[in-house]
Each structure stands twice: as structure tokens, then as C-alpha cells.
Image: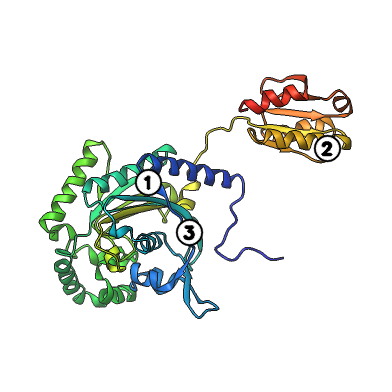
Amino acid sequence: MIKALRGMKDILPPVSEKYLHFINTASKLANNFGFEYIETPILEETSLFKRSVGESSDIVGKEMYEFIDKGGNSVCLRPEGTAGVVRSFIEHKFDRKEGIFRYFYYGPMFRYERPQKGRLREFHQFGCETFGEPSVYEDANMIILLKDILDFYNIDYTLKINSLGCEKCMPVYRKKLIEFLDTKEAKICEDCIRRKATNPIRVLDCKVDACKDVYVDAPKLLDNLCEDCKKDFEKLQDILQKNKISYEIDIFLVRGLDYYTKTAFEFVSSSLGSQNAIAGGGRFDRLVEFMGGKPTPAIGFAIGIERILDLIELPQNKREGIYLGVLTENAKDKAFEIATNLRKKQKVIFIYNKKSLKAHLKGADKSNAKFAAIIGEDELEKNSIWVKDLDEKKEEILKIDFFLKKFGEIDV
């Protein structure tokens, strides 16, 4: 028997119902904030992620599904969504146009890592990206949109924020941090030693307890911000406070990717155990230029969908649609004609095989249909159909023409 690959998982009902409900809800809320849908390929050139995510990241160093295709090209399954959106933004020359561009996306991502609860090798993200808006108000806008999505499902969370500085203040801080790390090299892990030479700020994200103890005494990012970054970070806090949004400042929040600058934020939930991050993002003002486009301020976030599906409770489903069944083989053609007609307006669950009335009613109840509509020999002869309202427990026999007119014009 062939099974799904390790770290890959089918999304089946009832979880798939939660997944679709979340996608529809998040998409609608994003659209309310002015975001439009974009879809990028799952397969991209490997160089896209090496340039954007960064050679120092664990994603590029350890986790990418990378291979050589039949044309001799190095390609990989996308490990995250932002790089593809940036590539599309530049490729279609939106970086050369005036205006603000807001996109949302969703779909599967792939990372070859040890599978664990809420963290599989194939996972799904919902994300939003804004290009062309440098204002810190857009940072707050992103956080509020993300908050609204989580609040819709009553998910318990804590918002953490930090500032990663800019091209003015980051080099000064990086130098101080490297000098500190040089004195602590014997006490930090091999990954941190490697990161020190590639992207030293990422050591602050290390999960090794011994390293975390060392970094308590490291220079602080917030103490080294330039005036512009400090002003923006203070303004962000002011906006959040005025909108009654609780937050914590986390000086060790640096995110896992190389392209972030200035604002970084993360939503964590105590309901998920050790893997408690459910969403996060921040500014990447230099990434478009770094990828070959014109300098363009940008900010975005992504939600790990699998992380929150266990936390989502859907509203109780109301009965909907029509269950259509036959008691005799002769009624199949007429029932098929009815189903085809009704599906222009209604959800119709048509059961081809003849069954007893009792069996059909049991199936209708299991399918959560609002109406059961059954055709037997008597109904076929009289060009009628037996209908039962499964909420009201009322039944009646209707002429088929009247039935089609009634149920083809109303939503049930």
C-alpha cells in the first residue's frame, strides 16, 4: 500500500471544512483592507530563495526541497511565500509604477525538516504583502488585519513586536554584536558561530538554552536604533495603544529570514505548546532592490494555517441544500434532469442508487441537507416528487414543475 510521504498529510473532512472556512474568512477580511489575490508558482528557481531568504537561514541551509530538473535547472518547491510575490512584482514591472500595491495569497509551502505537531514538511500559509508604502501606519494596518483574522475565531494570542533597525543603524549594531560574540564563542552553539559570519543578528533567535543565557547580556537592538527607526517604533506603539491593542516588546524577536528591517511582529499562542508561533511578519524595505527591482518599501505577514486549525471552532452548521434520491431505477433519468436544473441555484446531493425511503432519509440526515426529495414509481407516473423539510419535519407531494420553480428560485 502506498502512503503519503513522511511529513505530508491529506486534508480531509471535517478538517478540510475548517481549512476552506479559514481561507474564505481571511480572504474576505484581507479584501476589506484593500488586498487583492495573487497566486505564484509552487516551483521556482532555487536562486530566488537563496537571494531573498538568505544563505544563512536554516531554510536555505538545511530545509529546501531542491533538485535539478530535466532541463538542467536548479529548482525547488517554495519554502515560503514572500519571495515569489516579490519576484512577480518585479517581473511584471510593478516596481516601476507609482502607487501602493497590496496582495494576499494562500497555498502549500515545503520544508524538509523533522515533522512535528503543527509543523509538517508540506504546510499551508495565508499571507499578505504591501509594496510602495513606507508609512508606519501600514505596519499597524498589517497587525490590525492579522488581529482581526485571529479575533474572528476567538483565538487566544499574545502580540510581540520589535524593531530591527535600518541600513543606517543596523551596521553599527551588527559590529557591536559581533564584538560581543567574539568574546563568547566558546559558550555558543555551532549554528550561532556560523550565523556570526553570515547574519549575526539571527543568533538572537537561537532556541538553545545555553545560547539564550549568553544573549541576555548582548547589546540590545532597541538601544542602537537611529532617530528615524526609534521614531517609527514609538509611533507604532502609539497607534496600537490608541486602538487598544495589547502587545509586548520582545528584544530577541528577529524573525527567521534575512530580509526583514525595522518593524518585526509575531503572534504566539499558549495553546500550542513549544511551537507556539501562529503568525508573524515585518518590513522588508530592501528586498525588492536586492532582487533587482527599483527601491520599494514593503511589509508583509504570513499565518501558519495548520498551526491554528486545531484552535478553530466553526459555527454550528445549518442544514442546507437538497438530498435527491430515487426508489426505483426508472426514476433516475428524471431525477438527474432535476438535479442538473436545481444546481444552477442550489446545493444538490443526488444519490444514484435506488434505496428504501428509510435509507434515503437516513442519508439525507447524515448529509445535513435541509430537504429530502424522493421520486418513486407513483411520483414518476404523476410527474411529482415527495419532499420533506428536515428542520420542520413537514412533508408534501409537489408537481415537478412547481418544485423546480420553487426551489430553483430560493436558497435553501
Near-viewer residue (408 or 79): 408
Residue found at x 75% / y 20%: 395
Q: Position of residue 208 (x, y in %)?
A: 34, 66
Residue density around tag 1, few if under 14, some if 14–19, many if 20 or more, within 10 Å = some
Q: Position of residue 46 (x, y in %)?
A: 43, 73
Quadrant (top left, top right, bottom left, bottom right) of the N terminus: bottom right
Cα gap from disc 2 to disc 3, whole angstroms: 47 Å
Residue found at x 16% / y 69%: 171
Where does label 1 land, which residue?
A: 35
Cα gap from disc 3 to disc 1, whole angstroms: 27 Å
Where does label 3 land, which residue?
A: 119
Residue 332 got which mark?
2
- First in sequence: mark 2 vs mark 3: 3
Query: Disc 3 or disc 1, which is closer to the eye?
Result: 1
Judged left or right of residue 9, residue 408 is: right
Residue density around tag 3, few if under 14, some if 14–19, many if 20 or more, within 10 Å = some
Residues at marks 3 and 1 touching, judged by CB atoms closer than 8 Å = no
